[in-house]
Image (tube, rainbow, N blue to C red):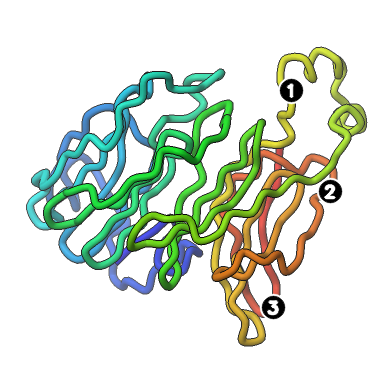
């Protein structure tokens, strides 16, 4: 199975053997299925089902689609949300269906950032719950993917206006905890040090641009303790997954926002990338 963004362990690794490495329009292709509209999310796999998300290019309709792995036939094509006023100051840099869903036995959790999050029954396609009250201004559209651990679903909202991480109860969609996070930084100083020629113009055109981020968190276990590692704009945070208590934070240096990675953990170290 491949149940979430970057796979079961969130590190992009697969233990599958003897996979084909050459493809053409016909070679090593079992079936082809056209998908309407546009999505940048990755497909997820559970059992015989392949799930993915897609959206109208203008963001007014958001969908979850399930495909039968053996036949390529569409099992479910579900309009999850209508959105009257989609946001994106820079269309084309992203799609409105960029976060990858996360699936487990009987349920899939689809997330469209500020547009909404929903839990669907994987057999019937029925919407079990939804949340549309968690909002932020992504500026260029949503991208952070949801993850699950134990009884919780974790979502990240790092917009230019507000920045927070929230844990929802998987069964009901109710909020278990929500932590706001913001790191003070002098954007003008950072831009100047970074060599931006017209700092005043940049600040006017992209106010609070150093607040937004698009990273996906990950769960690690270190010295017997679980930690939720969540890169954000200008800092990376560690939380207790069950309570939301901040365990530590590390400031990024210089150009440390617009983070779009998913961190990996090995031998006591957390690795991530930052950018601008």
Dot 1 or dot 3, earlier in sequence: 1
Given this view, does label 1 or label 3 mark the residue nearer the observer? 1
Q: Secondary structure at mark 2?
A: loop
> With respect to residue 208, does 245 lie above or below?
below
On the image, the x and y values in percent for residue 149 come to 45, 69
Q: CA distance from mark 1 to mark 3?
A: 37 Å
Q: Residue at x 66, y 31 (%)?
A: 160
Of residues 216 and 106, the one drawn nearer to the viewer in this rendering: 106
Please count the marks in the image. Answer: 3
Dot 3 or dot 2, earlier in sequence: 2
For residue 128, side relative to residue 270 (left or right): left
Q: Which mark is residue 27?
A: none
Instruction: State if disc 2 and disc 3 touch (CB < 8 Å).
Output: no
On the image, the x and y values in percent for residue 113 come to 47, 39
> With respect to residue 270, does 215 lie above or below?
above
On the image, the x and y values in percent for residue 267 come to 66, 79
Instruction: State if disc 2 and disc 1 touch (CB < 8 Å).
Output: no
Please name the residue that numbered disc 3 is placed on: 268
Dot 1 or dot 2, earlier in sequence: 1
> With respect to residue 243, does 69 lie above or below?
above
Q: Which mark is residue 253?
A: 2
Instruction: State if disc 3 and disc 1 touch (CB < 8 Å).
Output: no
Q: Residues within 10 Å of mark 1 (few under 14, many from 20)?
A: few
Please name the residue that numbered disc 1 is placed on: 207
Of residues 32 and 240, the one drawn nearer to the viewer in this rendering: 240
**Quadrant in the rendering for residue 102:** bottom left
Q: CA distance from mark 1 to mark 2?
A: 20 Å
């Amino acid at each position: 199975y491949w149940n979430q963004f970057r796979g079961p362990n969130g590190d992009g690794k697969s233990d599958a053997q003897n996979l084909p490495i050459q493809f053409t329009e016909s070679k090593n292709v079992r079936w082809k299925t056209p998908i309407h509209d546009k999505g940048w999310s990755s497909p997820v796999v559970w059992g015989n089902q392949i799930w993915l998300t897609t959206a109208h290019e203008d963001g007014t309709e958001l969908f979850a689609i399930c495909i039968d792995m053996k036949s390529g036939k569409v099992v479910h094509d579900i309009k999850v949300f209508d959105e009257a006023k989609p946001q994106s100051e820079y269309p084309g840099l992203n799609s409105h269906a960029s976060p990858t869903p996360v699936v487990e036995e009987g349920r899939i959790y689809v997330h469209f950032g500020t547009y909404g999050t929903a839990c669907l029954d994987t057999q019937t396609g029925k919407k079990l719950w939804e949340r549309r009250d968690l909002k932020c201004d992504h500026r260029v559209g949503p991208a952070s993917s949801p993850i699950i651990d134990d009884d919780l679903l974790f979502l990240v909202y790092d917009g230019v206006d507000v920045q927070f991480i929230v844990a929802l109860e998987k069964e009901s969609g109710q909020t278990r905890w929500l932590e706001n996070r913001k790191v003070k930084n002098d954007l003008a100083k950072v831009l100047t040090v970074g060599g931006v020629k017209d700092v005043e113009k940049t600040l006017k055109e992209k106010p609070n641009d150093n607040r937004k981020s698009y990273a996906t968190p990950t769960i690690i276990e270190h010295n017997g303790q679980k930690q939720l590692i969540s890169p954000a704009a200008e800092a990376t945070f560690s939380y207790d997954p069950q309570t939301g208590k901040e365990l530590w934070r590390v400031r990024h240096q210089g150009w440390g926002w617009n983070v779009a990675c998913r961190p990996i953990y090995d031998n006591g170290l957390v690795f991530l990338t930052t950018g601008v």
